[in-house]
Image (cartoon, rainbow, N blue to C red):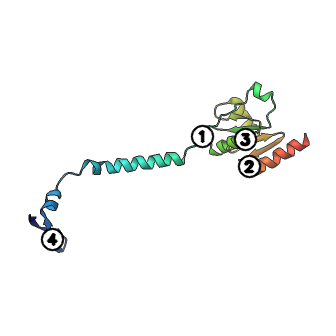
Amino acid sequence: MEQLTHPVVTKIPGVFVYCIMTDSAYQNQNAPPSKLRRLNGPIAILIILAALAMINYKPSIKRIHCDDAILSTKPEVVMLGTWWCKYCYQARRYFTTNNINYCEYDIERSAEGERLYHRVNAQAVPVFLVDQYVISGFDEERLKQLLDKVREST
């Protein structure tokens, strides 16, 4: 069984190209793309979105809001932060994994938190109040040293 060939002339500016296509290639040249091929783009986008979701996943950490009951236990650290701050999230995770008694004021949702934030003249979040000390920004080593110092003095 002999396949028919079809001469095809392709015009490229300034150049003429002559090639011979087999019968099946010539018939498939103008065929609509297969269903699988049409799905390649959306599938690639879904894979990329799934990878981004996995990379950015952060397990939920319970926030301990400062209220009268919590404050009566005299937490070691009072944090002034926001729900969207990634450094506040890291601080919550640090306090939870190291069993540090803390509570948090969301400065955007709590009038008391906002008042404390302005009282210590803070410029960014998170802000940590440890005994009479104020620390701006999350630094595990600085917090550990300060907590050790405060624990020794009491």
In three-dimensional space, the C-alpha distance between marks 1 and 3, rounded to whole angstroms, equals 15 Å
In three-dimensional space, the C-alpha distance between marks 4 and 2, rounded to whole angstroms, equals 69 Å
Residue drawn at x 81%, y 32% is: 74
Circles 2 and 3: CB atoms closer than 8 Å: no
Q: In front: 103, or 124?
A: 103
The residue to which callout 1 is attached is: 59
Q: Amino acid at mark 3?
A: Phe
- Which quadrant, please, contains the C terminus? top right
Considering only vertical position in the picture, is 114 above or below 16? above
> Can the viewer see residue 134?
yes
Circles 4 and 3: CB atoms closer than 8 Å: no
Q: Amino acid at mark 4?
A: Cys
Mark toward the viewer: 4 or 2 = 4
Residue drawn at x 13%, y 58% is: 27
Please report whichever mark, 4 or 2, sits nearer to the chain's N-terminal start.
Answer: 4
Mark toward the viewer: 2 or 1 = 1
Please report whichever mark, 2 or 3, sits nearer to the chain's N-terminal start.
Answer: 3
The residue to which callout 3 is attached is: 95
Q: In front: 116, or 21?
A: 21
Please report whichever mark, 2 or 1, sits nearer to the chain's N-terminal start.
Answer: 1
Residue 140: mark in rendering: 2
The residue to which callout 4 is attached is: 19
In three-dimensional space, the C-alpha distance between marks 2 and 3, rounded to whole angstroms, equals 10 Å
